[in-house]
Image (cartoon, rainbow, N blue to C red):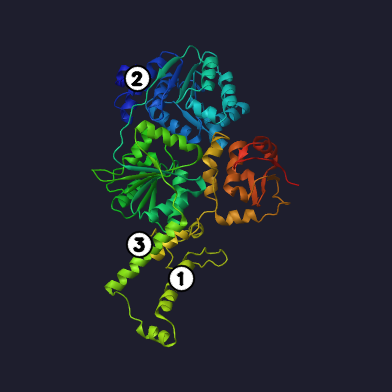
Amino acid sequence: MQKKPFAELGLAPELLKAVAKIGYEEASPIQAETIPQLLGGADIVGLSQTGSGKTAAFGIPAVQLADPTQRSTQVLILCPTRELAVQVAEEIAKLAFFKKGLRELPIYGGSAYDRQLRGLREGAHIVIGTPGRLIDHLERGSLRLDQLKMVVLDEADRMLDMGFRDDIEAILQKAPAERQTVFFSATMPPAIQQLIKRYGRSPVNVRIQASQLTVPAIDQVYYEVDRRSKIEVLCRLIDLQDINYALIFCATKIMVDDLADHLSARGYSCDKLHGGISQATRERVMAKFRRRAVDFLVATDVAARGLDVEDIEVVFNYDLPNDAEDYVHRIGRTGRAGRSGRAITFVAGREIYRIEQIARFTKTRIRRERVPSAEQVEQKRTSEFFEKLRTTLQKGEYQSHDGMIEQLLEQGYAATEIANALIDLLSREVAREVEPVRQEERPARAPARLAAPRARDRFESDAAPAKPRRESAVPKRRARMEEPAALDVDGVTLDEIEAMDDEPRRPRARAARVTDKRVHRREMVSPVSHEPGMTRLVMNVGKTSGVGPGDVVGVIANLANLERQEIGAIELREQQTFVDVAEDKATRVLKKLKGIRFKGRKLTIEPAA
């Protein structure tokens, strides 16, 4: 299939103007094949990889078919995650720019109901949402489908993998029988075929073969890393391989914020880019990175588009990209102009098969490496210290302390004993510099010798401190390597949440911003008492299972659709977790969470005695 000009696809003038404004020059193969079929009223089954332009393939017909004069929902687009729903809604808004009166509305869990209810009352013509929250609105009666013209299932295979088949079927059954049904999927498992057979009306099959991609000569490796260990492994690699200029890609804005905070707290010079940052700030950050005023830039794919920087040593895929195209675009930012480059990717659990697919698709070798141990990093630190000491001795660039040394020699100490004692004292001084500052002992201002203020200090002060340049001095390097993670709150892992409900990352945004003070306050709450208007529940997982307060908030908010104020005190024990929830929501929480897989275990949850 070949690309075609949009003018040949039968688009209305306002759509052609919107396409030109966005900057699309010609329709991709999936768009050229799909748009005329949808405008003609056919059902479609599209088999296409992410990044092929499928959002515009169904978005353009959806905008053209919707009638702004009717205050009713005419197009419904189902997405597996909040992030994709927001992304699709933004694309629809661009396409509808010149179609006056047309309203689009994203609906997903973790977001306030007020805005969604108001948008539905005002008559949203195109609704983009996740299955869980859409079902919620259907049950409330706030969303009506009687005027629906088109239903789109975007990434249908992923939604089925996440357990949404019942929700999808319930939505399709409530839609008018004469509506168009559009299925887009990267794969075609039997479950998808069954849905198509049951709800499609002689659909037209459109299959787009992914083109082979070539990648530059870049040294590519991957490390199998548990999600909770990624930050530690990243810091080990930076220190062990002496990386001084790198681009680090994360999947979401929240992950970018979180990682940038952790790296800054450990003394690294870094900044961040994502879609939530203003254009003016983005330009300032990019200018700093280009002139190497910061060593590490943490970014999302969206924010890094068009980024052109020379001499990047390494590209880190902190989170694995969605598809091979994104992977190639990411790693292509190193090894430019004939220079050597490196790409390092972190994979966790089931992501192993995805990195293998990327390797096959790109016809490149991505070799697996062992995660460096703490001993290796310590050995590197010791070697650097030795070389620095030897160089200082060779150059004679040190202050003489002959009098003190002679006194020690006269008292019977050997020269080797004196040297060992001095090195040991230096090591202890470094260790004291990186000891965690306890809250009750924390000074009003961090000592000047510290590499960077700790996260707790930054959260509780009004002014954000300046981020220091990373130095090569050995004490500073050890401070970065050994300082514990600055944030205590760990969000729910992507695999766990995506297997549970449709909004895997929104609670992470809330949890990641909980201050240490608030977390400690919650953990001190007695298991036998609870806040007024709250019911106390107990789970069979605790600290030994790796549970953090953010995990608890995330799983409850996601599965039971609770708002922030409806989740109260949390107390973590070794084998149990106590949590307060609003009394009128307790039954829903018990029903939604009972028996799910959480932190690798079957969850038991019940009212606390």
Residue at the spot of label 2: 32
Residue 23's disc number: none
Q: CA distance from mark 1 to mark 3?
A: 17 Å
Q: CA distance from mark 1 to mark 2?
A: 67 Å
Classify 411 as above or below 200.
below
Mark 1 vs 3, N-terminal side:
1
Mark 1 vs 2, N-terminal side:
2
Residue at the spot of label 1: 429
Mark 2 crowd level (few <14, some 14–19, many ≥20, 10 Å Cα): many
In the rendered image, the quadrant that contains the N terminus is top left
Mark 3 vs 2, N-terminal side:
2
Foreground label between 3 and 2: 3
Residue at the spot of label 3: 472
Q: Quadrant of residue 120?
A: top right
The image shows residue 423 at horizontal and vertical percentages of: 42, 72
- Name the residue at 42% across, 59% down: 267
